[in-house]
Image (cartoon, rainbow, N blue to C red):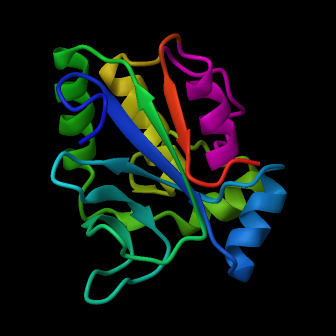
Amino acid sequence: MTSNEATGVDLTFVCSHTVSSRVISWFSAGHLSHVDANLRDGTFLGSYECATGSIPAGVRIRPTGYYPFSRRVTFSIPATAQQRARWLAFLNAQLNKDYDWDAIWGFIFNRDWRDPDAWICSELQAAALEASGIVPRLYLAANKITPVALALAVSAIPGVVIRDDKPW
């Protein structure tokens, strides 16, 4: 159970010791490389770059512990019941979309992260927060929304609670 079970939303940011995680963390100028939405049943909804067990890459619901991440930081974000419902509706409407490999190149070639055809993890979560009205339209470069940028944006929301299982 989370502090926002009834009305808020929870996002879990993670990192691991893999090369791709370290590259994303380095590129993002931080220690986070992935983000998922926490669902009430303990599962996670997000866009992940590779298959995990029988679950293919892309926007999917994944079980707790689907990958042995080395660090987890959960942000509990205040939201009304209506905002939470819109947040979940947006995320559920994105299920089964592809992982956005073009977004990786978009960091260099200016692809708009709000393009809804496919998602990387942080694009999906940022778009869901915007669509629900939990955050206003984010002032971020059109081609760059990284896990670190999203964590910084949501950490400034009044009332957000941050739980870091391995604080610095």
Q: Height in image: 107 above or below 142?
A: below
Q: Height in image: 127 above or below 62?
A: above
Q: What residue is rendered at 38% in x and 69% in y?
A: 58
Q: Quadrant of residue 20?
A: bottom right
Q: Position of residue 140 (x, y in %)?
A: 68, 28
* Bounds of the magenta segment: 136-157
Q: Is residue 146 visible?
A: no
Q: Looking at this rendering, what residue extends furthest in the bottom direction?
A: 53
For the N terminus, give its image quadrant: top left
Q: What residue is rendered at 45% in x and 55% in y?
A: 119
Q: Position of residue 115 (x, y in %)?
A: 47, 44
Which one is in front, 66 or 115? Answer: 66
Is-magenta flag for residue 137? yes
Q: Looking at this rendering, what residue extends furthest in the top direction?
A: 158
Left or right: 55, with 142 as reference point: left
Q: Position of residue 102 (x, y in %)?
A: 59, 64
Q: Position of residue 96 (x, y in %)?
A: 25, 65
Q: Height in image: 3 above or below 11?
A: above
Which one is in front, 163 or 106? Answer: 163
Is-magenta flag for residue 59? no
Left or right: 64, with 69 as reference point: left
Q: What residue is rendered at 27% in x and 31% in y?
A: 87
